[in-house]
Image (tube, helix red, strand yellow):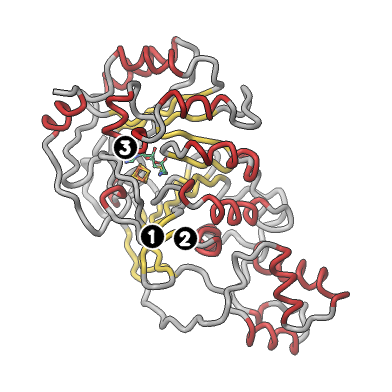
Amino acid sequence: MTSKTPITPDVITIPRKVDVDILPNIIGLQKDALANALNEIGIPAKQIKMRTAQIWQWLYVKGAQTFDEMTNLSKDFRTLLLKSFSITRPEIITRQISNDGTRKYLLRVTGGHEVEAVFIPEKDRGTLCISSQIGCTLTCTFCHTGTQKLVRNLTPAEIVGQILIARDDLEEWDKSAGEKRNVSNIVLMGMGEPLYNTNNVRDAMLIAMDNEGIALSRRRITLSTSGVVPEIIRTGSEIGCMLAISFHATTDEVRDVLVPINRKHKIAELLDACRNYPKLSNSERITFEYVMLKGINDSDDDARRLVELISGIPAKINLIPFNPWPGSGYERSDWKRIEAFGDIVNKAGYASPIRRPRGEDIMAACGQLKSETQRSRKSAKQMADEVKGQ
Ligand code: SAH
Ligand code: SF4
């Protein structure tokens, strides 16, 4: 529900540094690519394995931001590294802290473009929501990011860099093994469609999952897709992370409007891909995200169709109260309606948690992430009529 408390987020603005990073970034390389890069700058073959491991540890266990910190490397070697590579993270432009502790980072990446990452602290864990693209090519009608044109895909360094930034800000480096971390989970639910940038997302997640580095378990990473069917199986086999589907509608007519990729990949095709998702089991369920839009997709009939459609798929349904943004033209379903919908889903045997909106006062909630250009919007009534095919 929209917060009625006065909005007093803590905002800091960090002065911009000059863009001087012309050397190749050492962040974001897979281990074998890092080894090749060291070979190219003349490191003897018999040292490569050890040097690669040392640098990897500095970058992803200790969070080193300069080569100077890498004190177990000789001075000459550090100087060679300094001349050959940069250690470049996205730059924090602003950090806002919500009344509920949610932190939103506005980040600047190469080319001066801006993306956002959001850290959501919870009682027993902390989830970092990261972006995969600058903007989005898709145009889901209820999503703020969908009003922004795609600028480009993020690189592996820029994707993994969002994790590094959060660990820097939350002072997470150098914790001993087993010590509880703030950033315990990652969700690819920020700006962009991760499965339109599958290779870079995969490469970044392989770095995040590497046991000698950031060491996040694949089960603590959830990738959310609007339904890029041809890439879904590959996500399971090449990343192995948990899958979330932005489902949002129970008929092709409505989904065609809300999630326009549905015109290309219909509900039946999408659910087929889900049924074949590698490692799918009761302990590794698919999350179906379902945004609750008043009068559009929130009826009892919708709830019943939903459970029928996903029958046989180990799943949970995440009900997301619509987060409004200026000019969206949609309204959030009433709380009672959301609960009634959830009850039907629940009685059919599916967990149906209602996602509590977080960071609303700083526009950090799902689907509110930044947009530079605004499409003009129809009224809610016009949209409802369109959905109903009137
Ligand atoms: N592009 C991917 C990843 C973004 S995830 C995807 O669509 O799955 C962001 C989640 O928030 C998606 O489920 C999206 O549908 C949902 N969302 C978008 N706009 C929203 C809004 N205004 N209110 C609530 N949820 C929204
Ligand atoms: Fe893009 Fe996802 Fe928003 Fe759709 S919901 S416009 S796919 S970010």
Select label 1 or label 2 by which is in front: 2
Select label 2 or label 3 by which is in front: 3
Which label's residue is closer to the chain start, 1 or 2?
A: 1
Instruction: Give, as a three-letter code, the residue at label 2.
Output: Leu
Q: In which quarter of the image is the C terminus?
A: top left
Residue toward you, 84 or 166: 84
Q: Residue at x 43, y 13 (%)?
A: 308
Q: Residue 115 carries which label?
A: 1
Name the residue tied to disc 3.
260
- Asked if 223 appears above or below 270 in the picture, the reply is below
- Asked if 374 appears above or below 236 in the picture, the reply is below
Q: What element carries label 1?
A: strand
Instruction: Give, as a three-letter code, the residue at label 3.
Output: Pro
Select label 1 or label 3 by which is in front: 3
Q: In which quarter of the image is ligand 2?
A: top left
Quadrant for residue 50, please give it. Answer: bottom right
